[in-house]
Image: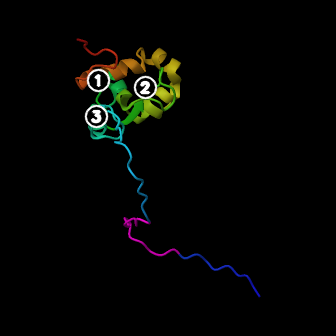
Amino acid sequence: MTFARKPYVRKAQPLYAKVECRGTYAAPVTEIPVSAPKTPHRAGGVAEQQHKARLAGLGCMCCQMALNVFTPDIELHHLRAGQGWGKGDWMTLMPLCVEHHRGASGVHGLGTKGFPKHYGFTEQDMLDRALQLLNIAPIGQGDTL
């Protein structure tokens, strides 16, 4: 008796195949569910996508502030100072070109201490400038009644 392995042949499927529902679980509802209050800064929502699209139209903030040049090809960068790694809200995004984002003379290349020394302004200054161009009050500086 031999135990030869059969080769696995994957069946061809369309690129966007419909996902089948294998079963459902319906728990009895005993009380009214409490939904979280909707905020304008909900992650993944329409407001976030619109904000990102508007940021992309601004061009690189560092190129504008340092060189007074419009650079259309951008990457969105989260404010790092005081946020922790990857903990920033989508309202702390700023548009930067590839060189000023990941390059040797960029935010990630120079670091949080070297970047302000090299350019004379901080990430917070670039974020404030981007929000100012979009007519949005910076976080913590909104008008109070």
Point 30% across, 34% down: residue: 38
> Mark 1–mark 2 contact, CB under 8 Å?
no
**What distance separates the C-alpha of mark 1 from that of mark 3?**
10 Å
Image disc number at residue 82: none
Q: Percent x, y for residue 99?
A: 43, 33
Report the magenta residues as a range.
10-22
Residue farthest toward the bottom in the current orientation of the protein: 1
The amino acid pointed to by label 2 is Leu
Question: Helix or strand or loop: what does disc 1 sit on?
Answer: helix
Magenta span: chief secondary structure:
loop
Image height of 10 relative to 131, above or below: below
The amino acid pointed to by label 3 is His
The residue singled out by tag 3 in the image is 51
**What distance separates the C-alpha of mark 3 from that of mark 2?**
15 Å
> In the rendered image, which quarter contains the N terminus?
bottom right
Quadrant in the rendering for residue 144:
top left
The residue singled out by tag 2 in the image is 79
125 left or right of 137? Answer: right
Q: Percent x, y for residue 80?
A: 47, 25
> Mark 3–mark 2 contact, CB under 8 Å?
no
**What distance separates the C-alpha of mark 1 from that of mark 2?**
13 Å
Q: Is residue 105 visible?
A: no
Point 58% across, 75% down: residue: 8
Question: Helix or strand or loop: what does disc 2 sit on?
Answer: loop
Q: Residues within 10 Å of mark 2 (few under 14, many from 20)?
A: many
Residue 13 in the magenta stretch? The answer is yes
Quadrant in the rendering for residue 32:
top left
Residue 115 in the magenta stretch? The answer is no
Compare marks 3 and 2 and give the one earlier in the sequence: 3
The residue singled out by tag 1 in the image is 131
Compare marks 1 and 3 and give the one earlier in the sequence: 3
Q: Is residue 77 visible?
A: yes
